[in-house]
Image (tube, rainbow, N blue to C red):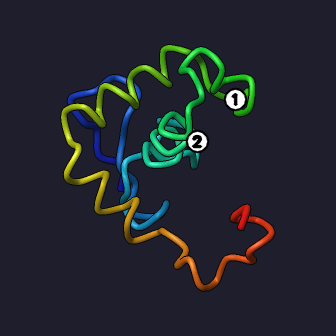
Amino acid sequence: MIQATEHLYIVRDDRILRGEPIIKGTRTSVRAIVETWRMGTAPEEIPKGLPHLTLAQVFDALSYYSDHQDEINVYIERNRIPDDLIDPSVRGL
């Protein structure tokens, strides 16, 4: 079941990512956009890597994050790959 949020482009769908907030009409999570932004990618550059998204959707995802930081941070931590499972060559060690 799709549930609207107070944000135009953000919904929850129990069938996609267990109800994690996503961009409407996609499987792209708010978490994925926030993590990309946190790695230093400017919001304007994110649609270049995710061309199915508009800049408005990216900004709405970041706005949703601003309003729901604790919730999205839980999703980020829950999906984090433990350091000991990451090959050292990928980590840059």
The residue drawn where x is 64% and y is 84% is 85
Q: How crowded is mark 1: few (under 14 residues within 10 Å), some or many (20 or more)?
A: few
Horizontal and vertical percent for residue 26? 58, 41
Marks 2/1: CA–CA distance = 8 Å
The foreground one among 23 and 82 is 82
Q: Which of the two residues, 83 or 4, is positioned nearer the viewer here? A: 83
Residue 81: where, in percent of width, then height?
Answer: 55, 74
> Amino acid under label 2?
Thr
Residue drawn at 23 percent across, 44 percent down = 69
Quarter of the image where the N terminus is located: bottom left
Count of marks overlaid on the render? 2
- Which residue is the site of mark 2? 26
The residue lying at 47 percent from left, 63 percent from top is: 17
Describe residue 44's horizontal placement relative to residue 34 as left or right.
right
Please give the residue where the numbered disc 1 appears in the rendered image: 52
Give the residue at the far bottom of this rendering. Answer: 84
Q: In which quarter of the image is residue 19?
A: bottom left
45 displayed left or right of 89: left
**Amino acid type at mark 1:** His
Q: Foreground residue, 54 or 77?
A: 77
Marks 2 and 1 close (CB-CB < 8 Å): yes
Q: Is residue 14 above or below residue 56?
A: below
49 on left or right of 39: right
